[in-house]
């Protein structure tokens, strides 16, 4: 079945780095743009960034721009999030999600239709 | 940046009742709006895209409406499994997405 599984979370000190992974299965990973979304403890959802299906384009939220980098390896069906210079406010559950376009002859609508279960990142000294 | 504001923050209703959740955009997003449901300890689940189109497998008691800056998610007759947090999200400037802060639907 269609599935996303995140890994790589943990406890890290402020200023250090961490890399998250998201393993995809059950669909043609290389055909979809992919997002990272995070959720701080007790808070709402925050969009982190998106990477094009072929990795050619990437867009980031202002809160992580210059510190976080998304990449993907389509041969391994895996999405990555490299997080550098981590701050306490980066503490959150990080979800990867598939971007799905629903297109008619008139226009396209978009949504994140498949989500992983999340991996927890805690930034603390 | 487009800011999404949801109201109320918490909505208390009973099973079988109708629930109406609101989402307002700081500028027009046309019909480029999505609704998600999130239960405790779970990932979000796609409910509605294009402001009013139910995603695959979503029951007909969920309906979305609105365009421009004002949107509504209606649950016609609440089931026990519907008690959760609901988020709206705009994609007018796709692929950059913005979420509302969520509405908690409680008994």
Image (cartoon, helix red, strand yellow):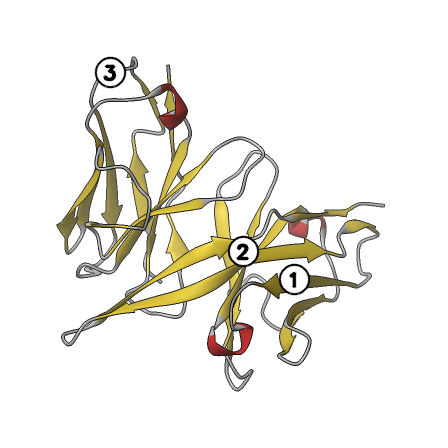
Residue density around tag 1, few if under 14, some if 14–19, many if 20 or more, within 10 Å: many
- Res. A60 visible in picture: no
Disc 1 to disc 2, C-alpha distance: 16 Å
Q: Position of residue A1 (x, y in %)?
A: 54, 55
Q: Which mark is residue B16?
A: 3
Q: Residue at the location (74% across, 66% down)?
A: A84
Q: How many marks?
A: 3
Q: Is residue B55 above or below residue A54?
A: above
Q: Nearer the viewer, residue A47 or A7?
A: A7
Q: Nearer the viewer, mark 3 or mark 2?
A: 2
Q: Quadrant of the N terminus of chain B?
A: bottom left
**Residue position marked by numbered label 2 in the rendering:** A1
Image mark 2: chain? A
Q: Quadrant of residue A25?
A: bottom right
Image mark 1: chain? A
Q: Nearer the viewer, residue B30 or A23?
A: A23
Disc 3 to disc 2, C-alpha distance: 33 Å
Q: Which mark is residue B24?
A: none
Residue furthest out toward the bottom: A56
Mark closer to the chain start, 1 or 2? 2
Left or right relative to B47: residue A45: right
Secondary element at image label 2: loop
Disc 3 to disc 1, C-alpha distance: 39 Å
Left or right relative to B97: residue B28: left
Q: Residue at the location (61% across, 64% down)?
A: A24
Secondary element at image label 1: strand
Q: Residue at the location (26% across, 42% down)?
A: B23
Q: Position of residue A23 (x, y in %)?
A: 66, 63
**Residue position marked by numbered label 1 in the rendering:** A22
Q: Position of residue B28 (x, y in %)?
A: 19, 60
């Amino acid at each position: 079945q269609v599935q996303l599984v995140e890994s790589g979370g943990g406890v890290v000190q402020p200023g250090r780095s961490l890399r998250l992974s998201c393993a995809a299965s059950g669909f043609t990973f290389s055909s979809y743009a992919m997002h990272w979304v995070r959720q701080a403890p007790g808070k709402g959802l925050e969009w982190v960034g998106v990477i094009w299906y072929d990795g050619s384009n990437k867009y980031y939220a202002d809160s992580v721009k210059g510190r976080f980098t998304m990449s993907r390896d389509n041969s391994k069906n895996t999405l990555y999030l490299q997080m550098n210079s981590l701050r306490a406010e980066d503490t959150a559950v990080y979800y990867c999600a598939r971007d799905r376009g629903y297109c008619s002859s008139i226009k396209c609508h978009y949504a994140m239709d498949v989500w992983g279960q999340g991996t927890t990142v805690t930034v603390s000294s | 940046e487009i800011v999404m504001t949801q109201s109320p923050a918490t909505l208390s209703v009973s099973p079988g009742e109708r629930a109406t959740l609101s989402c307002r955009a700081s500028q027009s997003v046309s019909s480029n709006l999505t609704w998600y449901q999130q239960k405790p300890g779970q990932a979000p689940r796609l409910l509605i895209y294009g402001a009013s189109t139910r995603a695959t497998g979503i029951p007909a008691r969920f309906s979305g409406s609105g365009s421009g800056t004002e949107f509504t998610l209606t649950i016609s007759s609440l089931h026990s499994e519907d008690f959760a947090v609901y988020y709206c999200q705009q994609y007018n400037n796709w692929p950059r997405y913005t979420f509302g802060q969520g509405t908690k639907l409680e008994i």
